[in-house]
Image (cartoon, rainbow, N blue to C red):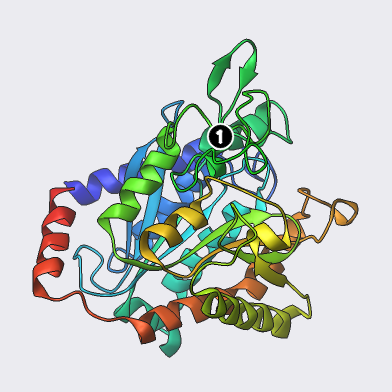
Amino acid sequence: MKAQNALLIVLILLLSAAAYPQGINGAYHSYLELEADIFALQQRYPDIVKVFDIGDSLEKRNLYAIKISDNVLVEEDEPEVLFLGCHHAREWISVEVPFLMGKYLAEHYASDPAVKRFVDQSEIWIVPLVNPDGLEYTLHGYRLWRKNRRDNGGGDYGVDLNRNYGHKWGIDNLGSSANPASEVYRGSTPFSEPETRAVRDLYLKKNFQALISFHSYTQVILYPWGYTKQPPDGAATLKEIAAEMSARIQAVSGRLYEYGQSGDSLYLTNGDVTDWAFALSGIPAYTIELPPIDWASGGFFNRQEDIDPIFQENLPAMAYLIDRAIRDYRPLGPAVYDLKRRLFKKD
């Protein structure tokens, strides 16, 4: 019966998405199209792919996390890696890259020994669409909308979800804003938004060893701190990993992704997800700003034909981070592992 219900859900979602046979935004995903595709992926690869509903957006759309692992229904004592997409609604390419990573892992598990090792020895979590309400607004309202759709009163809408995390939230008005009309409005309190609370709650239940949050544009790899120009403890390791990811990207396409500390290399940000994760766990946490390099080269308007090449060049960087998480992992031990497993079953 459960299998029949799951199949029915997939069919309903596919029929809903079929209302736009070429995609309401071309080859890019709308919320419904992504929902259909992730459940279809689970249906096709049920042994290694499981979709979890981790919460609701402000407008009550489901927030989905895709787990990929060999024993996908079991919480194992393995390193976990998190890929996030679309904190910012107008950054459509940031949905596609993490989703395509999940698709690639599932499709190549049986044929690629490296992929098999990743899936067998780690737990890979992908949240391709953190901001579904904002994404839908870019399709039906204003293409360059950035924030979620919080009604702030007075005709102002939206919280910048990547200024709403807890570490150094609101420390100044340079890295975020207290003005509800601002594009970088940080919200009324840390984690005031259901979307960031969903990411927080997933993170706190797991043992993530590495994280990438995808954005666009500027073609850079950034690491903490964002709230200050002062480097964190461990900056040398963060820089080393970023340099390796950049080199692997460049080896595929010839395209150079510059890299550096976020607050020193680009601009100050406070309340962002990478600072929060690094402060909490000390893990390698990165923002990858996808191509193009500037507004003159297209800005947020990547061509449909750019989706796969951008994914392909980022694939070895993501693979490197998973591989490093596996190599560096130290088991939690029976007591902590058992607690994790019981929490997982409770959910």
- Mark 1 closeness class: few <14, some 14–19, many ≥20 residues within 10 Å: many
Is residue 80 visible to the viewer in this orientation of the structure? Answer: yes
Q: Nearer the viewer, residue 44 or 293?
A: 293
Residue 117's image quarter?
bottom left
Residue at the top extreme, as displayed: 154
Residue at the right extreme, as displayed: 296
Which residue type does callout 1 highlight?
Answer: Arg
Query: x%, y% of residue 316?
Result: 58, 79
The relative height of residue 167 versus residue 231 in the rendered view (above or below) is above
Query: x%, y% of residue 260?
Result: 67, 69
* Left or right for 210, reference 174: left
Residue at 50% x, 71% y is: 104
Residue at the front extreme, as displayed: 230
Residue at 37% x, 42% y is: 198
Query: x%, y% of residue 180?
Result: 62, 23
The relative height of residue 277 versus residue 242 in the rendered view (above or below) is above
Number of marks drawn: 1
Residue at 53% x, 24% y is: 150
Residue at the bottom extreme, as displayed: 113
Q: Which SS class for mark 1?
A: loop
Residue 280's image quarter?
bottom left
Query: x%, y% of residue 176?
Result: 62, 39
* Left or right for 300, reference 28: right
**Pointer 1 residue:** 186
* Left or right for 308, reference 148: right
Is residue 290 visible to the viewer in this orientation of the structure? Answer: no
Q: Nearer the viewer, residue 242 or 23?
A: 242
